[in-house]
């Protein structure tokens, strides 16, 4: 998992609205891995975009065609 973003001056905010059942499933998934939801979401986005430490663990930038 990436480190928590501590420099809030440079951090950006994204608001995501989830259905209650989706949020519950996310909360359970994250609780099993023991990071914060913030760290989990950050890692998933980095992995999908092929950037950051999460992507480095799975081989770097993804070369799939973007939608």
Image: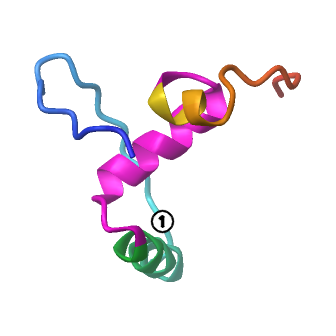
Using the image, determine if residue 29 lies above or below residue 11. below
Question: Which quadrant of the view contains residue 49?
Answer: top right
User: Horizontally, is 33 left or right of 38 in the view?
Assistant: right
**Residue 45, horizontal then vertical, whole percent:** 53, 38
Locate residue 32 relative to residue 66 in the image: left or right. left
Q: Where is residue 56? Give x, y as percent.
A: 57, 27
How many neighbours does mark 1 have within 10 angstroms: few (below 14), some (14-19), or many (20 or more)?
A: few
Of 24 and 36, which appears nearest the observer? 36
Q: Is residue 41 above or below residue 25?
A: above
Which quarter of the image is occupied by the C terminus?
top right
Which residue position holds label 1?
A: 18
In this view, 17 is above or below 25:
above
Which segment did they paint magenta? 33-52
Instruction: Describe the element under mark 1 as helix, strand or loop.
Output: loop
Q: Position of residue 65 (x, y in %)?
A: 88, 22
Using residue 63 as the reference point, say whether residue 53 is left or right of it.
left
Q: Residue placed at 31% from the left, 68% from the top?
A: 34
**Is residue 60 positioned above or below 3 on the image?**
above
Q: Position of residue 37 (x, y in %)?
A: 34, 58
Residue drawn 51% across the image and 36% down it: 54
Q: Is residue 23 magenta?
A: no
Q: Is residue 3 left or right of residue 45?
A: left
- Residue drawn where x is 82% and y is 20% of the image: 63
Q: Is residue 36 magenta?
A: yes
């Amino acid at each position: 998992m990436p480190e928590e973003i501590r420099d809030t001056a440079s951090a950006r905010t994204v608001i995501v609205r989830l259905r209650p059942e989706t949020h519950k499933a996310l909360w359970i998934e994250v609780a099993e891995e023991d990071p914060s939801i913030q760290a989990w979401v950050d890692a998933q986005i980095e992995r999908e975009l092929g950037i950051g430490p999460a992507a480095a663990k799975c081989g770097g930038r993804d070369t799939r065609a973007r939608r």
